[in-house]
Image (cartoon, helix red, strand yellow):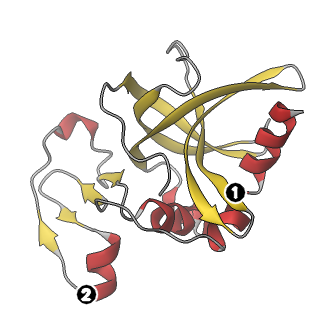
Amino acid sequence: MKKILVISAISIMVVFAMTACSGAEDGGTEIGNDETVHDMGTLLQGEVSTQTAAEPARSSGQGVIVIGERFFVNQFMEIMLNQQLYMGRNLQFEGMFFTTNFDGRDFHLVYRYTIGCCGEEPIGLVVDLGDFEPFADDAWVEVFGSLDFDYNAGLLTLRVLSIRELDERGSPVV
């Protein structure tokens, strides 16, 4: 029953995200090869700064969208509401890893919780691990990959290019 609830929550997290509140530590940035850094907060305030990419090999040509704690919910809402603008873009974020089996298929999720109308609700993405091995449930991971739509599952999915377990955990509730 818990697995069915998790898959259902994944499918409707957009609705929960739209009713959620947020408050955390750091913001998100978009990093590319000498490209402009876009932070949701500074974009809303009309401010823009520049930064050189620490790892240019990760850049998709449009930059990497690094989703931090402070604007985690806001940036995921933006992605969910404007999916067509983010397809093929590279995303990087941290969260808890979870695996569930639904209808004979394993689904892997990297997520955090947000406070919604009904308590804590998951917000994150289903991840396609490809050749990567899954982690234990509740492992804190940093995931980097390309946003895609899995037509077989009917879900927005992150095609993983790299994923690693971190020793230091961020806030599970954003």
Q: Say which residue appears at 60% left-offset and 70% top-offset.
A: 20
Return the x and y of residue 90 as percentages of the image width and height. 40, 46
Disc 1 packing (10 Å; few <14; some 14–19; many ≥20): many
Tell me which amino acid carries mark 2.
Gly
Question: Alpha-carbon distance for marks 2 and 1?
Answer: 29 Å
Q: Tag 1, which secondary structure? A: helix
Nearer to us: label 2 or label 1: 1
Q: Is residue 82 left or right of residue 121?
A: left
Tell me which amino acid carries mark 1.
Met
Disc 2 packing (10 Å; few <14; some 14–19; many ≥20): few
Return the x and y of residue 158 as percentages of the image width and height. 54, 39
- Asked if residue 16 is positioned above or below residue 134 in the image, the reply reads below
Front-lying residue, 52 or 163: 163
Return the x and y of residue 93 as percentages of the image width and height. 40, 44
Label annotation for residue 13: 1
Front-lying residue, 101 or 59: 101
Q: Is residue 151 left or right of residue 104?
A: left
Q: Image quarter for residue 126?
A: top right
For label 2, the residue is 46
Front-lying residue, 77 or 147: 77
Q: Image quarter for residue 119?
A: bottom right
Position of the N terminus by quadrant: top right
Q: Tag 2, which secondary structure? A: loop
Q: Say which residue appears at 42% left-offset and 67% top-offset.
A: 23
The answer to whether mark 2 and mark 1 are in CB contact below 8 A is: no
Return the x and y of residue 2 as percentages of the image width and height. 83, 34
Among the two numbered marks 2 and 1 on one chain, the one whose residue lies closer to the N terminus: 1
